[in-house]
């Protein structure tokens, strides 16, 4: 399958229990062209962390990170509705039922698989936010991921780039694990992770691994998601070639081996950092590096909030530079106001896309955008979002930001400290363009956790 250079630069980042992999690449002329590739064992030493911090000190583009599939609970329910809003409500309820975490600590993502007469079949991925944060803590010392998913999605995207949207069972072998993915029409239908990789197969034989594969295939067939699929692609580094002779009892008509080296080339000025790559499966991190859309999004709200805070801080520094240039060039007041307003308008889509995942329907997004644009001539309305974010104390996290009536904003969040919540409440009341802060409530669910909500009315 022919590819093209991506318009935006991204970094793929795969986080495992004992190592991390990161990659910057393009997919072009049928191959992944690598510009930067790194593999490092965990935990990172202080020297390695400092080295990576210097390596990425000027990185300002997207970072798509993944955690292991085995850490994510994935189900394939049929919800009795075709309405997107109702599906998301049912997914939220189902996520809380199947995962032993309280509401605000659960991250979930729902993706529609098919429309049925009795409802809608979805793939529902659920994971505890503290699990994600534990993996992200390994890399936040040198880079901040902008989006989080599971590694199965990277595997799928790798396969789609080289083979297209074929109907296939994909087996991606790393040293310790096998990522099992079933795809059709470019969508993920089923996935799981098997705790046997090529190293265990070499030591103990192929029989138990084959039994796990057949068990996974039978589990998929019992779900009734689609008709049985007979084509299998086995992906891995070159040292899985021994499997070609060893596999004896997989009942598939079409079996192919894909060696990742055949689809990789070094780009000009390519940097290879850390450990040798020959023993590692790179399919997931390569797929993440060129992923244009993320079907399963498990990004924690705290990460989204931190990204926005950093963006605001960066814009403030840019604004200082802009004002200096304006002063030196003696630009007129109206030209200055136009530039300032343009700077904030540029972030409207980022706010909607990253800060507020609760806005799901297109018509709701359009309504909010139209409201922003209708107020764009009123600088205070654009400034208010900057002011809200910059008043948030460290240790206070925004869980939900909802646009209600014409001039009202509802905020929900959490903190371990009631005092920090109260400080945030007082800071909001002091913003000149805020008419009032009402419906302020704090609910202490435990000594270490306090939920709060409030409503801001604008002048």
Image (cartoon, grey):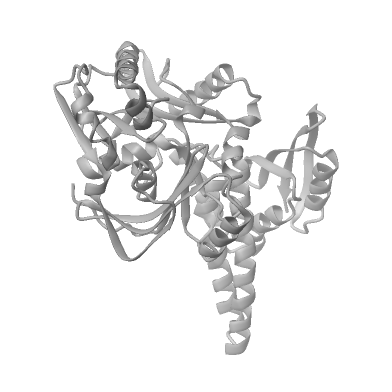
- Residue 320 shows in the view: yes
The residue located at (34%, 59%) in the rendering is: 7
Q: Nearer the viewer, residue 43 or 322?
A: 43
Quadrant for the C terminus in the image: bottom right
Spot occupied by residue 399 in the image (x, y as percentages of width and height): 65, 38
Spot occupied by residue 178 in the image (x, y as percentages of width and height): 36, 29
Q: Nearer the viewer, residue 289 or 314?
A: 289
Quadrant of residue 330 within the rendered picture: bottom right
Q: Please identify the residue farthest to the left as the structure is shown.
A: 253
Q: Is residue 77 above or below residue 171?
A: above
Q: Along the horizontal axis of the image, is 201 left or right of 389?
A: left
The residue located at (67%, 44%) in the rendering is: 408
Q: Is residue 199 above or below residue 28?
A: above
The residue located at (52%, 39%) in the rendering is: 18
Q: Along the horizontal axis of the image, is 320 left or right of 178?
A: right
Q: Nearer the viewer, residue 40 or 150?
A: 40
């Amino acid at each position: 399958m022919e590819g093209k250079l991506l318009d935006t630069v991204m970094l793929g980042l795969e986080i495992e229990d004992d190592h991390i992999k990161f990659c910057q690449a393009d997919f072009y002329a049928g191959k992944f062209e690598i510009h930067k590739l790194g593999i490092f064992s965990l935990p990172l030493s202080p020297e390695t962390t400092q080295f990576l911090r210097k390596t990425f000190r000027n990185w300002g583009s997207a970072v798509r990170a993944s955690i292991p599939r085995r850490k994510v609970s994935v189900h394939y329910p049929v919800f009795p509705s075709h309405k997107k809003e109702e599906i998301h409500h049912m997914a939220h309820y189902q996520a809380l039922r199947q995962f032993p975490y309280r509401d605000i600590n659960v991250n979930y993502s729902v993706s529609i698989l098919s429309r049925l007469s009795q409802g809608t079949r979805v793939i529902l991925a659920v994971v505890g936010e503290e699990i994600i944060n534990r993996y992200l803590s390994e890399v936040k010392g040198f880079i901040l991921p902008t989006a989080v998913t599971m590694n199965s999605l990277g595997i799928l995207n790798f396969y789609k780039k080289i083979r297209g949207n074929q109907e296939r069972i994909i087996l991606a072998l790393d040293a310790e694990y096998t990522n099992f993915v079933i795809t059709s029409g470019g969508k993920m239908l089923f996935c799981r992770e098997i705790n046997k990789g090529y190293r265990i197969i070499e030591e103990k034989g192929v029989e138990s691994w084959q039994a796990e594969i057949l068990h996974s295939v039978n589990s998929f067939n019992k779900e009734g998601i689609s008709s049985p699929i007979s084509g299998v692609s086995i992906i891995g580094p070159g040292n899985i070639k021994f499997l070609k002779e060893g596999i004896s009892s997989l009942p598939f008509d079409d079996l192919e081996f894909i060696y990742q080296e055949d689809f990789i080339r070094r780009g000009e000025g390519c940097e290879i950092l850390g450990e040798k790559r020959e023993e590692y499966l790179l399919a997931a991190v390569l797929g993440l590096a060129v992923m244009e859309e993320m079907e399963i999004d498990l990004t924690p709200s705290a990460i989204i909030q931190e990204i926005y805070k950093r963006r605001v801080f960066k814009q403030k520094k840019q604004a200082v530079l802009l004002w200096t240039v304006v002063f030196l060039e003696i630009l007129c007041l109206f030209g200055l106001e136009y530039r300032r307003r343009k700077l904030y308008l540029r972030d409207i889509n980022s706010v909607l896309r990253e800060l507020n995942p609760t806005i799901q329907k297109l018509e709701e997004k359009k309504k909010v955008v139209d409201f922003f644009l209708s107020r764009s001539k009123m600088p205070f309305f654009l400034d208010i979002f900057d002011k809200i974010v910059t008043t948030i104390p460290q240790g206070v996290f925004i869980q939900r930001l909802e646009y209600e009536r014409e001039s009202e904003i509802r905020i929900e969040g959490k903190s371990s400290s009631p005092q920090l919540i109260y400080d945030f409440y007082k800071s909001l009341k002091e913003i000149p363009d805020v008419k009032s802060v009402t419906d302020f409530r704090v609910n202490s669910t435990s000594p270490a956790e306090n939920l709060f909500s409030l409503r801001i009315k604008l002048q």
